[in-house]
Amino acid sequence: MNDTAKKHNIQTNNDSPVIERRKRPLCSCIDSALQRFFTDLDGHQPPQDLYQMVLSEVELPLLKSVMEYTRGNQSKAAEMLGMNRSTLRKKLEKYGLQD
């Protein structure tokens, strides 16, 4: 493994760089996705309300993952997320994640 690969936690697998996802911070994943999004705009007008768009894109998988992790226990999920159960229930309903 070369020094650059070591510095960026990159492993080589059949001469193909593979980033160890467990060592990659969540913010870098979001940064990569946003960079691709802006590149893909390719001169088209950027969307309005980008902040809300990004939050809604992140919120759904977050809720799904936490509900799966807590095996559907809304009290535990709400505690993990730092919100009260009624707020969590509203969000689950919004995304069609209610049982």
Image (cartoon, rainbow, N blue to C red):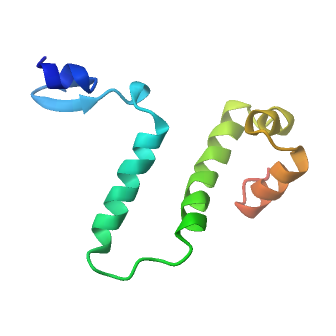
Residue occupying the point 73% across, 31% down? 70
Residue 2's place in the image compared with 55, above or below, is above
- The answer to which quarter of the image holds residue 93 is bottom right
Residue 15's place in the image compared with 98, above or below, is above
- The answer to which quarter of the image holds residue 54 is bottom right
Left or right: 35, with 11 as reference point: right
Q: Position of residue 74 (x, y in %)?
A: 83, 39
Left or right: 35, with 66 as reference point: left
Left or right: 43, with 80 as reference point: left
Q: Quadrant of the N terminus?
A: top left
Residue occupying the point 47% across, 42% down? 27
Q: Position of residue 92 (x, y in %)?
A: 76, 54
Residue occupying the point 67% across, 31% down? 69
Residue 91's place in the image compared with 43, above or below, is above
Q: Position of residue 6 (x, y in %)?
A: 21, 19
Which residue is farthest bottom? 45
**Number of callouts in the render?**
0
Residue occupying the point 62% across, 40% down? 65
Q: Position of residue 7 (x, y in %)?
A: 24, 22
Left or right: 98, with 66 as reference point: right
27 or 17: nearer the viewer: 27
